[in-house]
Image: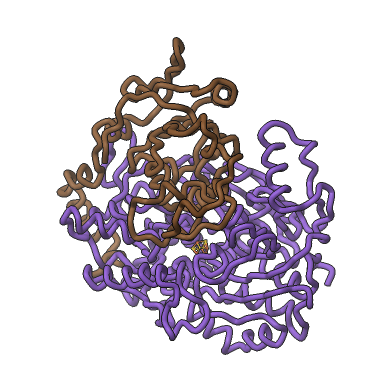
Amino acid sequence: MALTLYEKIFNRHVVKGLEDSYLIYIDRHLIHEVTSPQAFDGIRLNKRKIWRTDSIVAVPDHNVPTLDREQGIQDPISKIQVDTLDSNCVEFGLNQFKMNDTRQGIVHVIGPEQGLTLPGMTIVCGDSHTSTHGAFGALAMGIGTSEVEHVLATQCLIVRKLKTMQINVNGQAPKFISAKDIALAIIGHIGTAGGTGYAIEFAGDAIKDLSMEGRMTLCNMAIEAGARAGMVAVDDKTINYLKDRPYVPQGELWEMAIKDWKQLVSDKDAAFDQVINLDAGLIEPQVTWGTSPEMVTSISGFIPDPNLQSGSKKKSYLQALKYMNLEPNLPISDIPVDRVFIGSCTNSRIEDLRSAAEIVKSKKVAKSIKQAMVVPGSGLVKMQAEKEGLDQIFINAGFEWRQPGCSMCLAMNADRLESGEHCASTSNRNFEGRQGQGGRTHLVSPEMAAAAAIYGKFVDIRKL
Amino acid sequence: MEKYKRHSGVVIPLDRANVDTDAIIPKQFLKSIKKTGFGKNLFDEWRYRDHGEPDQDESTRQINHEFVLNQPQYKGGTILLARENFGCGSSREHAPWAILDYGIRTIIAPSFADIFYSNCFKNGILPITLSEELTQNFFEKSLNIAKFSLEIDLQHQKVIDGETSYHFDIDDFKKYCLLEGLDDIGLTLKNENDIQLFESQYKKNYPWLIRE
Ligand code: SF4
C-alpha cells in the first residue's frame, strides 16, 4: 500500500496499539530548563528510572542571558531553573551542553547542528517548536511536561494517529522570498487552526529548492498553523547536511542509514487527508499586523478593515488592532518600528544571519530605532558568523551582537519590549505580550527585519 | 491526579477566539520549578492592569474589573467557556496547571489546540468540544443569566443545562483515566515487556539509532 512519509515513520515506531491510540517509541528526547523540572520531580517522587539516558540531550536556552553570561545569571529565579537543569542532568547522568559551552544554543538549532536530529526518528521536546526537526524527514512533536515525564520513564508516548496534509508550494519562489515568507503565506492561507489534528508534509518545487535551514524555518512554523508536526521528505540535501556532524553515525552505520533514509519520502500514490496547493511565484514579503500569525499580509498590503469581517473574526480583528494601536487601511509600510530582533529558533541560523547582513552591509541603523539586536541561534552559529565577519557588519551598523539563546522571542530573560513598542521580529509568535507586556510584534523574515532596522520602517526589500 | 467527578458549576464566559498559552499564563511565571501556585496568575495580563512578577503580593495588584474573572457573578466558577482554537501556542503545561490551580476543572469550546488539549487530560481537566451554535447559546446564557451553571456528567458524556442535555465525544481511554484519576505512566509501564521487546528488534533494524 502506498504510504505517506508520516505513516512510514509512524508505523515503524508503533510498540502497541491501545484502545483508540498508540504507544509509540521515541528515539530522541531534547530537554530544556523551563518544561523539565516538574518532570524530573515526578520521576523522583515515584521512584522511577529513566528508560534510556542516551536518547536525551539537555540544553538551557529560554532563560539564559545574552550578555556577559560568563558572569553567571543575575536573575535569581532564572538561575534556579538553569541550576535545576544542571543538577538533574548530573543526578540522572544526562548529556548536557551547558550555558557556557560553545555547543549551547536554542534547542531546535543545536539538534540538527549536532546531528542529534536524524531522518526517520521520532523526536520530542517539551516545546511546541519541536516541529522544526521535521525538516529532516523525522516525526518531531512538541509535548507537555507530563509527557516529558512519560518519555523519561517509558521511552514511549501515547498518541493518536494524526491526519495527513500535503501542502504543495509549486513553482519557484521569487528573489528575496524566504522560507519565512512561505511559512507566513501558508498560515495566512489556512489559518492558525488550519493544521489542527494534522501532520503537514511540505512538498513541491519551492520546498525542494529550499536549503535545509530554510526547511527548518518552514517546519518550525508548522505549529503556528496548528499542526503538531511539519515535515519535508529526505533528499540529497538532507543527507549532505548531516554528513560528519558530531552525533551522526559513521562508517558502515552511515552507509546503512542513508540507504534507509532514501526511502523516507511519501509514495507516489499515497493518499493525504487534505492537499493544498500554493503558487510560490505569487508570494510577496510578509509582515504580520495583528496578534496571531494568521493576521498577516504582504509588504504592499494594508491593515484590513475589521468592519469587512463578521462574527468572531471581526471581534478578533478589532481586539488585535486595539492592542497593536493600528488603524484600518494603514499601509504596512507606515507602521512605526521601535526595535528589531533577529533571532529565535525560526531564524537565527547562519544563512539567516548572512542574508540579514547582506542588507545591513555598509549601512546604519535608523536613528528612530531604539534597539536592534542579533541573537545567534547557537554558540557555533555565532562562531561561524564571526569567522565570516558578519558580527562586524552588524556592529558597525549599530546592531547589538549577543550571545545565543531564546532571548526576545519570548522575553523570559532581560531582553524584552517595553509596553507600546513595535518590533520587527524574526521570531514565530506575535501574541499579546509575547515579547514583553504590551509589546507589539510584527513577524517578518531576517531580510525584512534587517531592512526595517536600516529604514526605520517596513520596506519592500525587492525594491532596494 | 484527582478523579474527575460529576459536578455542576458556574460558567465563566471568556469571549475571545485563539486564546493562547502566553495569555493563559505569561512567561515570567514559567520560571517556577513547581506545579502549583499558578492560579493567581491565570490570565495575568488581562486580569490585572499592572505587570505581574512571580512572588509578588497579590493584594498590591491593580485589578482589571472589566475582565471576566474579576466580575462578581463569575467568582467561584469552575467551567470555562471559550471560543475556537483555545490553548494555541506554546506547549507549556503551566497553562493547565494555572487553570486547575484556579479551580477550573472543565473547559468548553468549539475547538482546542492539540497540545493543550492533551495536556488537560494529564492534569485532570476535561476539555469538551461542542458546536459553535451550542457554545454561542451558552455564551448568551452566561452573559444574561446570573450564576448560569451547567452540570457535567463525564461518565455519560453529557453537558446538562437544566432539563436539556447535550452529548459530547471523548476518547475512551482518556475518559477512563480522568474518571479513575490514573497516571498514564503507570499504565504504560504495565507494557514494560512489550517496550523491551520492541526495543531489541528495533535495535536490529536501525542499529545507528541506538548505540550501546
Ligand atoms: S526561540 Fe522562541 S520559539 Fe524557539 S524555543 Fe526559544 S522561546 Fe521557543
Placement of A262 over or under A348, stated as above or below: above
Q: Residue at x 62, y 72 (%)?
A: A352
Placement of A166 over or under A233, stated as above or below: above
Specify the chain shown as brown.
B
Give residue A274's quadrant in the image: top right
Residue A386 appears in the rendering: yes
Q: Residue at x 15, y 48 (%)?
A: B193
Placement of A364 over or under A173, stated as above or below: below
The colour scheme of the drawn protein is: by chain
On screen, residue A53 versus residue B133, left or right, reads left
Q: Residue at x 51, y 57 (%)?
A: B52
Residue A172, position in %: x, y? 71, 59
Residue A230 appears in the rendering: no
Residue farthest along the top direction in this orientation: B163
- Quadrant holding the N terminus of chain A: top left
Q: Nearer the viewer, residue A43 or A173?
A: A43
Give residue A332's quadrant in the image: bottom right
Q: Residue at x 78, y 78 (%)?
A: A367
Specify the chain shown as purple.
A
- Quadrant holding the C terminus of chain A: bottom right
Residue A114, position in %: x, y? 42, 74
Q: Nearer the viewer, residue A1 or B72?
A: B72
Residue A93, position in %: x, y? 23, 71
On screen, residue A60 versus residue B67, left or right, reads left
Q: Nearer the viewer, residue A429 or A203?
A: A429
Placement of A238 over or under A12, stated as above or below: below
On screen, residue A312 versus residue B94, left or right, reads right
